Amino acid sequence: MKKCPFCAEYIQDDAIKCRYCNELLDKKEQKPKWYYTNTGTIIALLAIGPFALPLVWLNPHYKTHIKILITIIVLGSSIWFYYATKDIYEAL
C-alpha cells in the first residue's frame, strides 16, 4: 500500500488512478519548453544579447543569484562589445 500524493489516502501499489480523488498517478514527465532549456537560453543570449534577459528571469529553474550573475555578465559584455566596436570604428 502507498499513499496518494494528492489526497494522502492509502491505495494499491500498482494503482494508475486514485479511487478517492480520481487523480491519475502516472503523469508523464512533459518536455520543458525550448525557452526554459539551458541550450535555448544560451543560444538566445548569443543571438540577441541583452534582449534575451527576460528568458533568463522568467525561467523557473534558475535561482535568483544565478539570474543576477547572468544579467551582470551579459550587460557587462554588451557594454564592452559596444566600446570595442566604437574604438574599431574610430580607428578606420
Image (tube, helix red, strand yellow):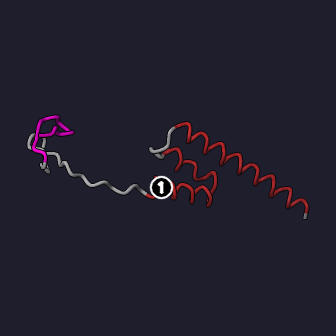
Specify the farthest residue to the bottom.
92
Determine the residue positioned at 58% across, 53% down.
Answer: 52
Determine whether, in the image, residue 60 is placed left or right of residue 64.
left
Instruction: Identify the main secondary structure in magenta.
Output: loop
Q: Secondary structure at mark 1?
A: helix
Range of the magenta residues?
A: 1-13
Determine whether, in the image, residue 60 is placed left or right of residue 68.
left
Determine whether, in the image, residue 14 is placed left or right of residue 57.
left
Determine the residue positioned at 9% across, 40% down.
Answer: 20
Decide whether residue 5 is among the magenta residues: yes
Q: Amino acid at mark 1?
A: Tyr
* Count of all numbered marks drawn on residues in the image: 1
Determine whether, in the image, residue 84 is placed left or right of residue 28.
right
Front residue of this view, candidates 70 and 49: 70
Determine the residue positioned at 61% across, 61% down.
Answer: 47
Against 38, residue 62 (above or below) is: above
Question: Neighbour class for label 1 at 10 Å: few (<14), some, many (≥20)?
Answer: some
Specify the farthest residue to the right.
91
The picture places residue 64, in percent across and down from the top left corner, at 53, 37
Q: Quadrant of residue 10?
A: top left
Which quadrant holds the C terminus?
bottom right
Q: Quadrant of residue 72?
A: top right
The picture places residue 2, in percent across and down from the top left corner, at 15, 39
Decide whether residue 50 is among the magenta residues: no
Determine the residue positioned at 71% across, 50% down.
Answer: 77
Front residue of this view, candidates 16 and 55: 16
Location of mark 1 (residue): 35
The picture places residue 71, in percent across and down from the top left corner, at 62, 44
Front residue of this view, candidates 5 and 72: 5
Specify the farthest residue to the top.
8
Which quadrant holds the N terminus?
top left
The picture places residue 49, in percent across and down from the top left corner, at 64, 55
